Amino acid sequence: MPRHAHYVPHGVIPAVLLPFADDLSIDEKSFRKHLRDVTATQGLSAITVNAHSTEVASCTFDEQRRVLNIAQDEVGARLPIVNGIWADGSLEAARIARMAEEGGASTLLVFPPAPFTLGQSPAMAVEHFKRIADASSLPIVVFQYPLATGQGYPRDTLLKMVEEVPTIRAIKDWAGNVSQHEAQIRELQHLPRPVNVLTTHSAWLFSSLVLGCNGLLSGSGSVIADLQSALFQAVKANDLAQARRLNDRIYPLARVFYADPWADMHNRMKEALVLLGRLPRAVVRPPLVKLTRAEIDRIRGALTEAGLLEGKAARDAA
């Protein structure tokens, strides 16, 4: 039984980063500090580990279990933990789901299997999620990719998944299409058994939240959980003037974090935390590589523009 039983995914959920040492091993001391830093923010409903933001594709099964154990040890008594399920096959996905429940996670975030880039059917998608649901009683967040990737679930498939797998309680919506995003918010959140839409459109978060999402799940929360929480609350309160002010601070960071190539988004967030003095180093695992000095300078400029780094401090850090 998870510590936060009956948690329904909603609200502000930062996806934390995973610091590495120079030898590419997990830097547990820095990870623990990072978890404490992020979760000191008021207004969070959970955190996410073993996802894109923690470079899950480069982590072994045992490393993923260790990441979850550390998160439980540091913050599990205070906040629910969402654990990512990254696997190309349904049997391995089910094995990770069992590990996550045994490790005290409160929710599963299920990434789409890579073979779906070659084509999928509704039956394949349902079978994948049923295997996971059979292995764990935890609520499931479906990671909805853009349809153009082949890994996104068309409307009819998504509705069939929700109908046949009752533990699906939310989607992490990265549809990348405003009209599809709005349609999913309107339909899924008003089903007889509602399914929350958690936006991960962090490059245009303000616009997305205004459409009525019941939450957000974002890697940017590893750096600006406080701004995201304040923005979510302002939109919920219909205080659009305050929301615009917050968005003006978030925008410079969204511009640099989500520049091409998108694969570097969390690489950039690590560099931001180094500039802010919250991480000792920004090491990523291959195939990711160290950012150029010019790009780090752009991140420094965005932090200054957002009011997170004083001009003098930014120059001293150079």
Image (tube, rainbow, N blue to C red):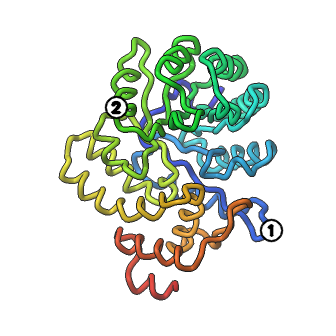
Image location (x, y in percent) of residue 101: 69, 30
Residue at x 35%, y 38% (from the top left corner): 178
Q: Residues within 10 Å of mark 2 (few under 14, many from 20)?
A: some
Q: Could you say whether the residue bearing mark 2 is in a helix, strand or loop?
A: helix
Q: Is residue 126 above or below residue 70?
A: above
SS assignment at label 1: loop
In three-dimensional space, the C-alpha distance between marks 1 and 2, rounded to whole angstroms, equals 44 Å
Establish if 81 lies above or below 305.
above
Badge 1: how crowded within 10 Å, few (<14), some, or many (20+)?
few
Pick the residue in front: 293 or 134. 293
Q: Name the residue under label 2.
A: 182
Q: Name the residue under label 1.
A: 23
Percent position of residue 237, x then y: 23, 41
* Residue 56 against residue 172 in the figure, above or below: below
Q: Quadrant of the N terminus?
A: top right
**Picture quadrant where residue 306 is located:** bottom left
Q: Residue at x 51, y 41 (%)?
A: 46
Q: Please name the amino acid that badge 1 sits on.
A: Asp
Q: Residue 230 carries which label?
A: none
Task: Name the residue at 68% across, 67% down.
Answer: 289
Q: Residue at x 31, y 45 (%)?
A: 207
**Depth check, front residue: 226 or 61:** 61
Relative to residue 207, is residue 132 drawn left or right?
right
Is there any visible trace of residue 106 in the rendered image?
no
Work out whether residue 75 or residue 259 is closer to the camera in this orientation and state it: 259
Tally of numbered discs: 2
What kind of residue is marked 2? Glu
Q: Where is residue 154 in the image (x, y as percent from the top left)?
A: 50, 24
